[in-house]
Image (cartoon, rainbow, N blue to C red):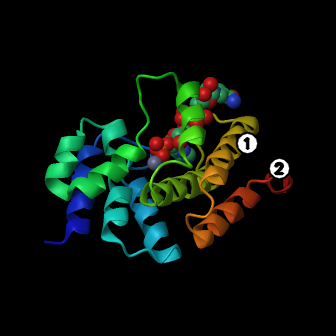
Amino acid sequence: MNQLIRAIAFAADKHRNQRRKDAEASPYINHPIALANVLANEGGIDDERVLLAAVLHDTIEDTDTSRDELVQWFGEDVARIVDEVTDDKSLPKAERKRLQIEHAAHISRHAQLVKLADKICNLRDILAMPPSGWSEQRKREYFDWAKRVVDELRGAHAGLETVFDEAYRQGAPSEHAA
Ligand code: NDP
Ligand code: ZN
């Protein structure tokens, strides 16, 4: 049984009615696949649990998927990583964003890797295909918040932190203006 293919099929089904926020409303599944691609092919990560958790990282937060369902299909380790990167949606947005900064240093290294890849992919999306209607200021606020989260987990993976820093640099105001 190839668990990675199974996770992609599982996430594709769970996210099937969801779209990203870019103008073309891209299929949601592109994003979790992009995380796994960054981790495997830019970070050299081959721990299957991390790659599975990347593919599944938004299933609890954004679909009807339960932690138990992930335990049943993908095991306790994968379910725990996904749980660690899942925001508590009962909290107001600003509080959730504050807690991401506060928690980033204290989650497991596996969860930190998924979180780092998530921020890399979201910065790249904002550069290439931003959410419709976002002003330059709103993009900048997102970049700066993402950097505050990543700054709390530095040491998790130097190579991917450099990949993040490069994406962040590309969003610098001088380059936006260019
Ligand atoms: P959102 O949380 O609404 O959107 C960002 C999230 O959307 C990403 O983290 C990503 O999450 C997902 N996403 C989907 N499509 C894309 C895409 N194409 N590019 C990038 N991300 C995408 O926005 P904010 O993070 O800005 O959070 C809202 C906060 O902003 C609130 O605290 C609110 O107070 C504030 N706000 C600011 C405004 C302003 O003009 N400055 C206006 C309105 C609100 P995932 O990885 O989970 O898919
Ligand atoms: Zn995500």
The answer to whether residue 53 is seen in the rendering is: yes
Judge from the rendering whether residue 130 lies leftward or rightward of residue 51; answer left or right: right
Please, is residue 172 above or below residue 60 in the view?
Answer: below
Q: CA distance from mark 1 to mark 2?
A: 8 Å
Q: Residue 15: percent from the left, percent from the top?
A: 30, 45
Give the class, few, some or many, for how many residues have Cα within 10 Å of label 2's Cα (few <14, many ≥20). Answer: few
Q: Residue at x 50, y 56 (%)?
A: 112
Picture quarter with ligand 1: top right
The answer to whether residue 24 is seen in the rendering is: no
Instruction: Classify residue 58 by image quadrant.
Output: top left
Q: Residue at x 71, y 44 (%)?
A: 144
Q: Residue 75: percent from the left, percent from the top?
A: 20, 57
Q: Which of 116/103 is in front?
A: 103
Q: Which of 77/123 is in front?
A: 77
Q: Earlier in the sequence, mark 1 or mark 2?
A: 1
Q: Residue at x 74, y 40 (%)?
A: 136
Q: Residue at x 79, y 53 (%)?
A: 172
Q: Mark 2 = which residue?
A: 173
Q: Which of 26/115 is in front?
A: 115
Residue 95: which numbered mark, if any? none
Please, is residue 38 above or below residue 115 in the view?
Answer: below
Check the picture and name the quadrant holding the N terminus: bottom left
Q: Mark 1 = which residue?
A: 140
Judge from the rendering whether residue 54 lies leftward or rightward of residue 170; answer left or right: left
Q: Residue 135: percent from the left, percent from the top?
A: 71, 35
Q: Answer yes or no: disc 1 within 8 Å of ligand 1.
A: no
Residue type highlighted by circle 2: Pro
Q: Are marks 1 and 2 in contact (CB under 8 Å)?
A: yes
